[in-house]
Protein backbone atom coordinates (compact mmCIF):
# COMPACT_ATOMS: atom_id res chain seq x y z
CA UNK A 1 0.00 0.00 0.00
CA UNK A 2 1.15 3.55 -0.71
CA UNK A 3 2.26 5.84 2.09
CA UNK A 4 -0.29 8.64 2.72
CA UNK A 5 0.48 12.08 1.26
CA UNK A 6 -0.10 15.12 3.46
CA UNK A 7 -2.17 17.76 1.66
CA UNK A 8 -2.62 21.26 3.08
CA UNK A 9 -5.74 23.34 2.37
CA UNK A 10 -5.70 26.86 3.80
CA UNK A 11 -8.98 28.74 4.25
CA UNK A 12 -10.44 25.25 4.62
CA UNK A 13 -13.60 26.42 6.41
CA UNK A 14 -14.56 28.65 3.48
CA UNK A 15 -16.73 27.99 0.44
CA UNK A 16 -14.03 26.54 -1.80
CA UNK A 17 -12.52 24.58 1.08
CA UNK A 18 -15.87 22.93 1.78
CA UNK A 19 -16.12 21.76 -1.82
CA UNK A 20 -12.44 20.84 -2.10
CA UNK A 21 -11.67 18.71 0.94
CA UNK A 22 -14.14 15.91 0.12
CA UNK A 23 -12.75 15.75 -3.43
CA UNK A 24 -9.23 15.32 -2.06
CA UNK A 25 -10.44 12.69 0.42
CA UNK A 26 -12.11 10.75 -2.41
CA UNK A 27 -8.94 10.58 -4.49
CA UNK A 28 -9.99 13.10 -7.14
CA UNK A 29 -6.76 15.06 -6.72
CA UNK A 30 -4.08 12.42 -6.28
CA UNK A 31 -5.70 9.23 -7.56
CA UNK A 32 -8.03 6.56 -6.26
CA UNK A 33 -5.13 4.48 -4.90
CA UNK A 34 -3.39 7.30 -3.00
CA UNK A 35 -4.18 7.63 0.72
CA UNK A 36 -4.10 11.18 2.08
CA UNK A 37 -3.81 13.03 5.36
CA UNK A 38 -5.66 16.34 5.19
CA UNK A 39 -4.16 19.38 6.87
CA UNK A 40 -6.79 22.11 7.16
CA UNK A 41 -5.85 25.62 8.24
CA UNK A 42 -8.12 28.53 8.99
CA UNK A 43 -8.07 31.65 11.16
CA UNK A 44 -9.36 31.67 14.77
CA UNK A 45 -12.78 33.23 13.94
CA UNK A 46 -13.37 30.23 11.64
CA UNK A 47 -12.08 27.58 14.08
CA UNK A 48 -15.52 26.34 15.09
CA UNK A 49 -16.67 26.04 11.48
CA UNK A 50 -13.42 24.25 10.67
CA UNK A 51 -14.13 21.75 13.41
CA UNK A 52 -17.56 21.18 11.85
CA UNK A 53 -15.89 20.34 8.53
CA UNK A 54 -13.63 17.90 10.36
CA UNK A 55 -16.71 16.23 11.91
CA UNK A 56 -18.25 15.83 8.46
CA UNK A 57 -15.05 14.35 7.05
CA UNK A 58 -15.09 11.74 9.82
CA UNK A 59 -18.78 11.06 9.19
CA UNK A 60 -18.17 10.52 5.48
CA UNK A 61 -15.86 7.59 6.32
CA UNK A 62 -13.62 8.16 3.30
CA UNK A 63 -11.50 5.03 2.82
CA UNK A 64 -8.49 7.01 1.53
CA UNK A 65 -8.50 9.55 4.37
CA UNK A 66 -5.89 8.38 6.85
CA UNK A 67 -5.83 11.43 9.12
CA UNK A 68 -7.10 14.96 9.65
CA UNK A 69 -5.22 17.92 11.10
CA UNK A 70 -7.62 20.86 11.64
CA UNK A 71 -5.81 23.82 13.11
CA UNK A 72 -5.36 27.57 13.33
CA UNK A 73 -1.62 27.15 13.81
CA UNK A 74 0.25 27.74 10.56
CA UNK A 75 3.32 25.72 11.61
CA UNK A 76 1.25 22.67 12.56
CA UNK A 77 -0.68 23.04 9.30
CA UNK A 78 2.42 23.17 7.11
CA UNK A 79 4.46 20.43 8.77
CA UNK A 80 5.31 17.60 6.41
CA UNK A 81 2.95 18.56 3.60
CA UNK A 82 3.83 17.58 0.01
CA UNK A 83 0.94 19.43 -1.61
CA UNK A 84 -0.30 22.85 -0.46
CA UNK A 85 -3.47 24.42 -1.83
CA UNK A 86 -3.68 28.01 -0.68
CA UNK A 87 -7.34 29.04 -0.67
CA UNK A 88 -7.33 31.36 2.34
CA UNK A 89 -7.10 35.03 1.64
CA UNK A 90 -8.46 38.36 2.66
CA UNK A 91 -11.63 39.07 0.66
CA UNK A 92 -12.17 42.36 -1.11
CA UNK A 93 -14.91 44.23 0.74
CA UNK A 94 -17.00 47.14 -0.50
CA UNK A 95 -15.15 50.40 -0.28
CA UNK A 96 -11.72 48.87 0.25
CA UNK A 97 -8.84 50.22 -1.79
CA UNK A 98 -6.92 47.79 -4.00
CA UNK A 99 -3.82 48.61 -2.04
CA UNK A 100 -5.46 47.70 1.29
CA UNK A 101 -6.54 44.29 0.02
CA UNK A 102 -3.10 43.71 -1.48
CA UNK A 103 -1.46 44.73 1.74
CA UNK A 104 -3.50 42.21 3.78
CA UNK A 105 -2.72 39.41 1.34
CA UNK A 106 0.96 40.23 1.09
CA UNK A 107 1.30 39.82 4.83
CA UNK A 108 -0.70 36.54 4.83
CA UNK A 109 1.35 35.06 1.97
CA UNK A 110 4.61 36.22 3.44
CA UNK A 111 3.99 34.43 6.72
CA UNK A 112 2.60 31.30 5.10
CA UNK A 113 5.65 31.20 2.79
CA UNK A 114 7.96 31.20 5.79
CA UNK A 115 6.01 28.37 7.44
CA UNK A 116 6.05 26.27 4.27
CA UNK A 117 9.73 26.93 3.74
CA UNK A 118 10.58 25.81 7.26
CA UNK A 119 8.16 22.90 7.74
CA UNK A 120 6.79 21.50 4.45
CA UNK A 121 8.38 18.58 2.60
CA UNK A 122 11.31 19.91 0.51
CA UNK A 123 9.61 18.94 -2.76
CA UNK A 124 6.25 20.47 -1.76
CA UNK A 125 4.07 21.53 -4.69
CA UNK A 126 2.14 24.74 -4.05
CA UNK A 127 -1.05 25.93 -5.77
CA UNK A 128 -2.38 29.40 -4.93
CA UNK A 129 -6.12 29.87 -5.45
CA UNK A 130 -6.83 32.96 -3.35
CA UNK A 131 -6.95 36.24 -5.26
CA UNK A 132 -4.98 38.03 -6.51
CA UNK A 133 -3.72 34.50 -7.19
CA UNK A 134 -0.75 35.25 -9.46
CA UNK A 135 0.63 37.95 -7.20
CA UNK A 136 -0.02 36.00 -3.99
CA UNK A 137 1.98 33.16 -5.56
CA UNK A 138 4.79 35.56 -6.43
CA UNK A 139 4.97 36.81 -2.84
CA UNK A 140 4.96 33.23 -1.59
CA UNK A 141 7.84 32.42 -3.94
CA UNK A 142 9.86 35.42 -2.77
CA UNK A 143 9.54 34.45 0.89
CA UNK A 144 10.14 30.73 0.45
CA UNK A 145 13.45 30.85 -1.41
CA UNK A 146 14.37 27.26 -0.60
CA UNK A 147 11.24 25.91 -2.29
CA UNK A 148 12.14 25.48 -5.99
CA UNK A 149 10.43 28.23 -8.03
CA UNK A 150 9.01 25.52 -10.31
CA UNK A 151 6.99 24.27 -7.35
CA UNK A 152 5.00 27.47 -6.87
CA UNK A 153 2.00 27.93 -9.16
CA UNK A 154 -1.40 29.59 -9.29
CA UNK A 155 -4.77 28.42 -10.55
CA UNK A 156 -5.95 29.31 -14.07
CA UNK A 157 -7.24 25.81 -14.79
CA UNK A 158 -10.77 26.93 -13.96
CA UNK A 159 -10.57 29.52 -16.74
CA UNK A 160 -9.03 26.89 -19.03
CA UNK A 161 -11.87 24.46 -18.31
CA UNK A 162 -14.43 27.23 -18.80
CA UNK A 163 -12.96 27.86 -22.26
CA UNK A 164 -13.20 24.16 -23.15
CA UNK A 165 -16.78 24.13 -21.86
CA UNK A 166 -17.84 27.13 -23.94
CA UNK A 167 -16.41 25.57 -27.11
CA UNK A 168 -18.08 22.22 -26.39
CA UNK A 169 -21.43 23.98 -25.88
CA UNK A 170 -21.05 26.03 -29.05
CA UNK A 171 -20.22 22.98 -31.20
CA UNK A 172 -22.49 20.58 -29.33
CA UNK A 173 -19.63 18.13 -28.73
CA UNK A 174 -18.29 16.42 -25.61
CA UNK A 175 -15.90 18.55 -23.58
CA UNK A 176 -13.44 15.62 -23.54
CA UNK A 177 -13.12 15.97 -27.33
CA UNK A 178 -11.95 19.61 -27.06
CA UNK A 179 -8.36 20.33 -26.08
CA UNK A 180 -5.52 22.82 -26.05
CA UNK A 181 -7.32 26.04 -25.30
CA UNK A 182 -4.90 28.39 -23.54
CA UNK A 183 -5.33 30.93 -20.76
CA UNK A 184 -2.55 33.50 -20.93
CA UNK A 185 -1.67 35.83 -18.08
CA UNK A 186 -3.49 36.92 -14.97
CA UNK A 187 -6.37 35.13 -13.26
CA UNK A 188 -8.41 38.32 -13.60
CA UNK A 189 -10.63 39.88 -16.22
CA UNK A 190 -7.56 40.76 -18.33
CA UNK A 191 -6.74 37.07 -18.87
CA UNK A 192 -6.62 36.05 -22.52
CA UNK A 193 -8.49 32.85 -23.41
CA UNK A 194 -6.90 31.81 -26.73
CA UNK A 195 -8.40 29.16 -29.04
CA UNK A 196 -5.95 29.57 -31.92
CA UNK A 197 -4.29 26.24 -31.10
CA UNK A 198 -7.36 24.42 -29.77
CA UNK A 199 -8.72 21.38 -31.57
CA UNK A 200 -11.74 19.09 -31.53
CA UNK A 201 -11.71 15.35 -32.07
CA UNK A 202 -14.22 14.55 -34.84
CA UNK A 203 -15.11 11.34 -36.71
CA UNK A 204 -12.93 12.66 -39.55
CA UNK A 205 -9.92 13.47 -37.35
CA UNK A 206 -8.68 16.33 -35.18
CA UNK A 207 -9.93 19.72 -36.48
CA UNK A 208 -9.00 23.29 -35.43
CA UNK A 209 -11.64 25.03 -33.31
CA UNK A 210 -11.39 28.10 -35.59
CA UNK A 211 -12.38 25.97 -38.59
CA UNK A 212 -15.30 24.25 -36.85
CA UNK A 213 -16.74 27.32 -35.14
CA UNK A 214 -16.28 29.36 -38.32
CA UNK A 215 -17.39 32.48 -36.48
CA UNK A 216 -14.29 34.57 -35.79
CA UNK A 217 -16.44 37.42 -34.56
CA UNK A 218 -17.86 35.23 -31.74
CA UNK A 219 -14.46 33.73 -30.92
CA UNK A 220 -12.79 37.16 -30.77
CA UNK A 221 -15.43 38.89 -28.66
CA UNK A 222 -18.24 37.04 -26.89
CA UNK A 223 -16.29 33.85 -26.24
CA UNK A 224 -13.45 35.79 -24.62
CA UNK A 225 -15.67 37.98 -22.48
CA UNK A 226 -17.85 35.04 -21.40
CA UNK A 227 -14.79 33.20 -20.08
CA UNK A 228 -13.36 36.36 -18.51
CA UNK A 229 -16.64 37.28 -16.78
CA UNK A 230 -17.84 33.79 -15.87
CA UNK A 231 -17.06 34.15 -12.17
CA UNK A 232 -19.20 37.29 -11.94
CA UNK A 233 -22.04 35.60 -13.87
CA UNK A 234 -22.05 32.73 -11.37
CA UNK A 235 -22.09 35.07 -8.38
CA UNK A 236 -25.06 36.85 -9.95
CA UNK A 237 -26.93 33.58 -10.48
CA UNK A 238 -26.01 31.77 -7.26
CA UNK A 239 -25.48 34.75 -4.97
CA UNK A 240 -22.30 32.87 -4.03
CA UNK A 241 -19.01 32.34 -5.78
CA UNK A 242 -18.08 29.48 -8.07
CA UNK A 243 -16.70 27.26 -5.34
CA UNK A 244 -17.60 23.90 -6.88
CA UNK A 245 -15.85 24.51 -10.18
CA UNK A 246 -12.90 26.23 -8.48
CA UNK A 247 -12.41 23.17 -6.25
CA UNK A 248 -12.75 20.75 -9.14
CA UNK A 249 -10.23 22.61 -11.26
CA UNK A 250 -7.78 22.82 -8.36
CA UNK A 251 -7.89 19.00 -8.31
CA UNK A 252 -7.32 18.92 -12.08
CA UNK A 253 -4.32 21.24 -11.72
CA UNK A 254 -2.58 19.12 -9.07
CA UNK A 255 -3.56 15.78 -10.63
CA UNK A 256 -2.10 16.66 -14.02
CA UNK A 257 1.00 18.20 -12.44
CA UNK A 258 1.69 15.09 -10.35
CA UNK A 259 0.45 12.35 -12.67
CA UNK A 260 1.14 13.99 -16.06
CA UNK A 261 -0.86 15.33 -18.99
CA UNK A 262 -1.97 13.03 -21.83
CA UNK A 263 0.26 12.94 -24.92
CA UNK A 264 -0.46 15.94 -27.16
CA UNK A 265 -2.60 17.73 -24.57
CA UNK A 266 -1.66 20.92 -22.83
CA UNK A 267 -3.25 22.67 -19.88
CA UNK A 268 -2.96 26.17 -18.43
CA UNK A 269 -1.04 26.87 -15.22
CA UNK A 270 0.16 30.08 -13.64
CA UNK A 271 3.93 29.57 -13.40
CA UNK A 272 7.08 31.59 -12.89
CA UNK A 273 7.91 33.18 -16.22
CA UNK A 274 11.31 32.47 -17.76
CA UNK A 275 10.65 35.03 -20.50
CA UNK A 276 8.94 32.58 -22.88
CA UNK A 277 6.71 34.26 -25.50
CA UNK A 278 8.15 37.64 -24.58
CA UNK A 279 6.42 37.62 -21.18
CA UNK A 280 8.60 39.48 -18.68
CA UNK A 281 10.64 37.05 -16.57
CA UNK A 282 9.81 37.15 -12.88
CA UNK A 283 6.02 37.32 -13.12
CA UNK A 284 3.72 34.43 -12.27
CA UNK A 285 1.88 34.23 -15.60
CA UNK A 286 -0.45 31.60 -17.01
CA UNK A 287 1.08 29.61 -19.89
CA UNK A 288 0.22 26.45 -21.79
CA UNK A 289 2.18 23.60 -20.20
CA UNK A 290 2.60 19.87 -20.44
CA UNK A 291 3.43 17.82 -17.34
CA UNK A 292 5.50 14.70 -16.95
CA UNK A 293 7.39 13.14 -14.04
CA UNK A 294 5.95 15.71 -11.62
CA UNK A 295 7.27 18.71 -13.60
CA UNK A 296 5.59 21.19 -15.90
CA UNK A 297 7.18 22.52 -19.10
CA UNK A 298 5.95 25.54 -21.05
CA UNK A 299 4.81 24.54 -24.55
CA UNK A 300 7.22 26.29 -26.91
CA UNK A 301 7.03 27.53 -30.48
CA UNK A 302 3.33 28.32 -30.84
CA UNK A 303 2.83 31.07 -33.45
CA UNK A 304 1.35 34.22 -31.89
CA UNK A 305 -0.66 36.62 -34.08
CA UNK A 306 -0.98 40.35 -33.55
CA UNK A 307 -4.41 40.09 -31.87
CA UNK A 308 -3.04 37.61 -29.33
CA UNK A 309 0.16 39.58 -28.80
CA UNK A 310 -1.76 42.67 -27.70
CA UNK A 311 -3.91 40.72 -25.25
CA UNK A 312 -0.93 38.79 -23.84
CA UNK A 313 0.94 42.07 -23.33
CA UNK A 314 -2.03 43.79 -21.67
CA UNK A 315 -2.43 41.07 -19.05
CA UNK A 316 1.37 41.03 -18.47
CA UNK A 317 1.21 44.79 -17.94
CA UNK A 318 -1.49 44.36 -15.30
CA UNK A 319 0.65 41.74 -13.53
CA UNK A 320 3.70 44.02 -13.58
CA UNK A 321 1.62 46.74 -11.94
CA UNK A 322 0.29 44.30 -9.33
CA UNK A 323 3.85 43.22 -8.62
CA UNK A 324 4.89 46.84 -8.06
CA UNK A 325 1.91 47.39 -5.77
CA UNK A 326 2.67 44.19 -3.83
CA UNK A 327 6.30 45.20 -3.34
CA UNK A 328 5.24 48.65 -2.15
CA UNK A 329 3.16 46.87 0.53
CA UNK A 330 6.24 45.05 1.78
CA UNK A 331 7.88 48.22 3.01
P1 LIG B 1 -13.84 31.27 -0.97
O1 LIG B 1 -13.51 29.93 -0.45
O2 LIG B 1 -15.06 31.42 -1.80
O3 LIG B 1 -12.64 31.89 -1.82
C1 LIG B 1 -11.31 31.84 -1.34
C2 LIG B 1 -10.39 32.58 -2.25
O4 LIG B 1 -10.37 31.96 -3.52
C3 LIG B 1 -10.78 34.03 -2.50
O5 LIG B 1 -9.58 34.79 -2.49
C4 LIG B 1 -11.36 33.99 -3.88
O6 LIG B 1 -11.18 35.20 -4.58
C5 LIG B 1 -10.50 32.95 -4.52
N1 LIG B 1 -10.97 32.40 -5.78
C6 LIG B 1 -10.18 32.10 -6.84
N2 LIG B 1 -10.87 31.58 -7.83
C7 LIG B 1 -12.14 31.56 -7.43
C8 LIG B 1 -13.34 31.14 -8.06
N3 LIG B 1 -13.39 30.67 -9.27
N4 LIG B 1 -14.48 31.21 -7.36
C9 LIG B 1 -14.47 31.69 -6.12
N5 LIG B 1 -13.35 32.13 -5.50
C10 LIG B 1 -12.20 32.06 -6.14
O7 LIG B 1 -13.90 32.32 0.21
P2 LIG B 1 -14.47 32.22 1.68
O8 LIG B 1 -14.52 33.61 2.18
O9 LIG B 1 -15.66 31.35 1.75
O10 LIG B 1 -13.32 31.43 2.45
C11 LIG B 1 -12.06 31.95 2.70
C12 LIG B 1 -11.48 31.32 3.94
O11 LIG B 1 -10.19 31.87 4.15
C13 LIG B 1 -12.31 31.59 5.19
O12 LIG B 1 -12.54 30.38 5.87
C14 LIG B 1 -11.44 32.53 6.00
O13 LIG B 1 -11.55 32.31 7.39
C15 LIG B 1 -10.06 32.19 5.51
N6 LIG B 1 -9.12 33.29 5.65
C16 LIG B 1 -7.84 32.98 5.93
C17 LIG B 1 -6.91 33.97 6.15
C18 LIG B 1 -5.53 33.58 6.50
O14 LIG B 1 -5.10 32.50 6.15
N7 LIG B 1 -4.80 34.39 7.21
C19 LIG B 1 -7.27 35.39 6.06
C20 LIG B 1 -8.62 35.61 5.69
C21 LIG B 1 -9.50 34.58 5.49
P3 LIG B 1 -12.19 36.46 -4.51
O15 LIG B 1 -11.98 37.07 -3.16
O16 LIG B 1 -11.72 37.32 -5.62
O17 LIG B 1 -13.56 35.88 -4.70
Image (tube, helix red, strand yellow):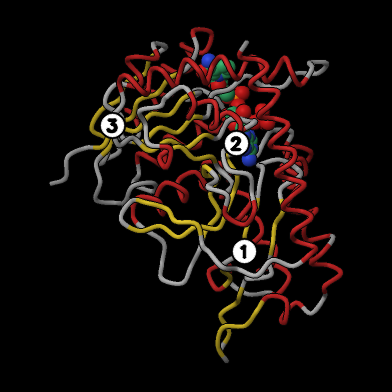
Give the vertical position of 44 relative to 26 (above or below). Answer: above
Which residue is rendered at x = 72% and y = 22% of the image? 92
Left or right of 66 in this view: 241? right
Q: Nearer the viewer, residue 166 or 327?
A: 327
Q: Tag 1: Cα neighbours inside 10 Å, few (<14), some, or many (≥20)?
A: many
Q: Is residue 66 above or below residue 78?
A: below
Name the residue that disc number 3 marks.
122
Q: Which residue is mark 1?
A: 181
**Numbered label attached to residue 325:** none
Foreground: 85 or 36?
A: 85
On residue 134, which mark appears?
2
Q: Secondary structure at mark 1?
A: loop
Measure how far apart labels 2 and 3 are at the Cα level. Answer: 22 Å
Mark 2: secondary structure: helix
* Front-most of residues 48 and 212: 212
The image position of residue 224, as x and y in percent, is 77, 57
Amino acid sequence: AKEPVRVLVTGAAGQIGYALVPMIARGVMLGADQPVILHMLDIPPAAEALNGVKMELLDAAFPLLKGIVATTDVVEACTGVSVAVMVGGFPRKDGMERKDVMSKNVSIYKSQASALEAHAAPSCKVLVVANPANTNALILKEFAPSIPEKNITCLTRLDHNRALGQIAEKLNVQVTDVRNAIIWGNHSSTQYPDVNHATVKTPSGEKPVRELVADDEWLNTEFISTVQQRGAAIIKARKQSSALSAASSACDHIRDWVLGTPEGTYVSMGVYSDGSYGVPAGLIYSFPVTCSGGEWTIVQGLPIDEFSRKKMDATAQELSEEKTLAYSCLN
